[in-house]
Amino acid sequence: MKNILSIVIIAIIFLCACGKSFDTTDIITGFKDDDLNVSDEKKMTHEDFGAAPMKADDARIFVVSGDNHARVFKFKNEGDLKQTKKYYDELGEESAILYSHTHAKDKFLIQMNGEVDDKTFNKYKSSMDKTLK
């Protein structure tokens, strides 16, 4: 009986430790489910990265409004995520015209054109956080 109880407890602990695995498409689906604009969404190519580090395992780009784009990245490790976020954040510090919104959670980063107002960006940020719960 003790062996069965031990096995059940170990199984419960193991199952609780296994979180859901998310991908960039889950984040995009969350945006759509929250009625946020996601137009012309596609997997990013090396041209879409421009001078930014190509450290992401997966990356998607889409139009938020007009010529304003957003990118969603998934990284293998925190170091690559931090390097990419730092790249975008430092661009904005060097020149206001290069400013962009960034937000990281878990292994994901969203980067959005700085022309998008804070209120709109915060909706995408909240949606991403909700999806990753």
Image (cartoon, rainbow, N blue to C red):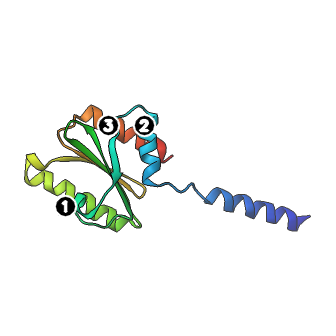
CA separation, marks 3 and 1?
25 Å
Q: Which residue is mark 1?
A: 50
Look at the numbered discs 2 and 3 and tell me whether their residues touch, using CB distance below 8 Å: no
Up-down: is 39 above or below 53?
above
Up-down: is 15 above or below 65?
below
CA separation, marks 1 and 2?
26 Å
CA separation, marks 2 and 3?
15 Å
Q: Which residue is mark 3?
A: 122
Q: Which residue is mark 2?
A: 32
> Residue placed at 42% from the left, 53% from the top?
24
Query: Where residue 94 sits: x, y (%)?
Result: 8, 54
Label 2 vs 3, first from the N-terminus: 2
- For residue 34, the mark is none
10 Å neighbourhood of mark 1: few (<14), some, or many (≥20)?
A: few
10 Å neighbourhood of mark 2: few (<14), some, or many (≥20)?
A: some
Query: Where residue 122 sits: x, y (%)?
Result: 32, 37
> Residue placed at 19% from the left, 40% from the top?
67
Query: Where residue 6 sits: x, y (%)?
Result: 81, 65
Residue 75, quarter of picture: bottom left
> Residue placed at 42% from the left, 37% from the top?
32
> Residue placed at 65% from the left, 56% from the top?
16
Secondary structure of the residue carrying tag 3 is helix
Secondary structure of the residue carrying tag 1 is loop
Compared across the picture, whether 131 is left or right of 4 comes to left
Q: Quadrant of the N terminus?
A: bottom right
Residue 39, quarter of picture: top left
What's the residue type where badge 2 is placed? Lys
Between disc 3 and disc 1, the foreground one is 1
Look at the numbered discs 3 and 1 and tell me whether their residues touch, using CB distance below 8 Å: no
| Count of numbered circles in the view | 3
